[in-house]
Amino acid sequence: MRVERICRYPVKGLSPEAMEEVRLEVGQCLPEDRLMALAQADAAFDVEKPSWARKTNFACLAANARLALLHTAYDPASRTLVIRPPEGAPVVADLSAPAGRAAVEDFVTGWLGEQARGRLRLVQAEGHRFTDIPDKAVSIIGLASLAALEQATGQALDPLRFRANIYVSGGLPWQEFDWLGQEIMLGRAKLRVFKRTQRCAATEVNPRTGERDATPPRSLRQHFGHLDLGIYATVIEAGTVAVGDALEPILP
């Protein structure tokens, strides 16, 4: 199996950033992955005492399909976030300054309109990641499994709907489910697979148009009897992974 695409998502709910190579550290997400989120005004997230919270506390595609129309880029060195809407000037914000964070909050709050439950708050906390599960993990999708879903539904599905970190080609459909509790080599890093990835309404959103034009969760249940596509794995030995590298299960 071969790594075809590597993605991180610096701001939860906003667009992915493609990477050619990344270093994975033990027990961590990809660098800058889900580093920040836009908390809804009624969310009680405390940046001083961060704890995991469900995605509905934040702007997210499951509830806010309109986010898919925003194209973003984050430079961790300068802490600059650029947001490009379909029309109009981009927002270029220095997140190290209160004015820059306020500019992002004001823009996305306005962009969501009534979907924003008050003014959004850009949040980040030391050592915390805004992942969909409490664990810090790397999410992996076997493209053969996605192809099986496409064949069953007769509909092409952009892999980016599923917002994984690593997309791999080769292998058999659903083969990755057999790795639960096992170790894999991903490039030069070693990971342990611990959970299947259950899919939600976020995957209904076309990442190119912002329209809800497919129902992957319902289709998965209808055709395969489950809601899962992809796996989560935790890094147990640090190392680099690059596009073109192999994914190899370690036989018990």
Image (cartoon, grey):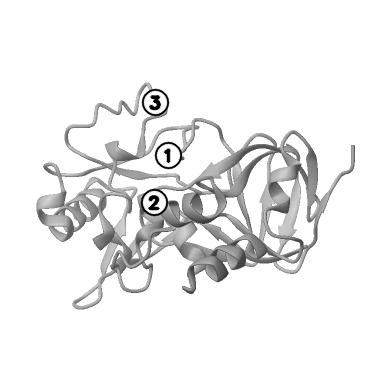
In the picture, the disc for residue 130 is 1
Residue 38: where, in percent of width, then height?
A: 28, 45
Q: Earlier in the sequence, mark 2 or mark 1?
A: 2
Residue 21: where, in percent of width, then height?
A: 67, 62
Residue 77 visible? no
View extreme (right): residue:
252
Q: Earlier in the sequence, mark 3 or mark 1?
A: 3
Residue 67: where, in percent of width, then height?
A: 28, 60
Q: Give the alpha-carbon distance from disc 3 to disc 2, as whole Å.
A: 16 Å
Circle 2: element type: loop
Residue type, numbered disc 1 = Phe
Q: Which residue is mark 3?
A: 50
Q: Give the alpha-carbon distance from disc 3 to disc 1, as whole Å.
A: 10 Å
Q: Residue at x 49, y 30 (%)?
A: 134
Circle 3: element type: loop
Q: Give the alpha-carbon distance from disc 2 to disc 1, as whole Å.
A: 8 Å
> Looking at the rendering, which quadrant does residue 179 occupy?
top right
Q: Nearer the viewer, mark 3 or mark 1?
A: 1
Query: Of residues 26 and 137, which is closer to you in this image?
Result: 137
Q: Which residue is mark 2?
A: 11
Q: Residue at x 38, y 59 (%)?
A: 215
> Looking at the rendering, which quadrant does residue 145 occupy?
bottom right
Reply above or below: 221 against 194.
below
Residue 239: where, in percent of width, then height?
A: 76, 48
- Lateral position of residue 191 relative to residue 61, left or right: right
Q: Do labels 3 and 2 touch, CB within 8 Å?
A: no
Q: Earlier in the sequence, mark 3 or mark 2?
A: 2
